[in-house]
């Protein structure tokens, strides 16, 4: 009989990286990793589009220029934090 710490069928034989005892990555772990990678890539693309938009704006208004520079600095720091 299993006690509270031992539940039959709960242990799948996989480690924390989703690998089974043979060292292969499970399909679910691969899909989850691909989903995370895809989402990060979309976030990077969105930030780069925002960056390009800010860089394309021209203004002679000093207050507007300051706001654009601040927005550009924030976006570039976010891109840097994502590791690109």
Image (tube, grey):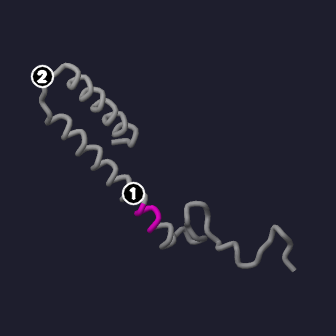
Where is the N terminus found, in terms of image quarters? bottom right
Residue 39, above or below 18: above
Nearest the viewer among 61 and 3 is 61
The span picked out in magenta is 31-35
Q: Secondary structure at mark 2?
A: loop
Of the numbered discs in the image, which one, if any, rests on residue 60?
A: 2
Above or below — where is 63 with respect to 43? above
Picture quadrant of residue 58: top left
Answer left or right for 28 relative to 12.
left
Q: Residue 46's spot in the image, x, y percent? A: 28, 48
Q: How many circles with numbers are drawn on the protein?
A: 2
Position of residue 36 measured from the top left corner of the image (x, y, whole percent): 43, 58
SS for tag 1? helix
Q: Magenta region, mostly helix, strand or loop?
A: helix
Separation of marks 2 and 1 at Cα, in angstroms: 40 Å
Q: In percent of the image, x 14 and y 36: which residue is there?
A: 56
Tell me whether circle 2 and circle 1 mark residues in contact (CB < 8 Å): no
Residue drawn 24% across the image and 39% down it: 51
Please tell me whether residue 62 belongs to the stretch shown in magenta: no
| Quarter location, residue 17 | bottom right
Ranked by sequence position, the earlier of labels 2 and 1 is 1
Of the pair 25 and 44, the residue shown nearer to us = 44
Answer left or right for 55 relative to 8: left
- Which residue is depicted at the point 27% across and 32% down? 72
Q: Which mark is residue 37?
A: 1
What residue sits 71% from the left and 78% below the top?
Answer: 9
Query: In which quadrant of the rendered view does residue 38 lie?
Result: bottom left
Residue mark closest to the camera, 2 vs 1: 2
- Closer to us: 63 or 11: 63
**Residue 21 location (% of width, % of height):** 60, 70
């Amino acid at each position: 009989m299993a006690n509270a710490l031992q539940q039959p069928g709960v242990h799948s034989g996989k480690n924390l990286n989703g690998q089974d005892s043979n060292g292969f990555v499970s399909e679910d772990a691969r899909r989850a990793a691909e989903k995370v990678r895809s989402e990060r890539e979309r976030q990077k693309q969105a930030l780069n589009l925002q960056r390009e938009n800010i860089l394309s704006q021209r203004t002679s208004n000093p207050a507007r220029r300051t706001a654009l520079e601040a927005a550009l600095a924030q976006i570039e720091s976010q891109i840097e934090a994502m590791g690109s």
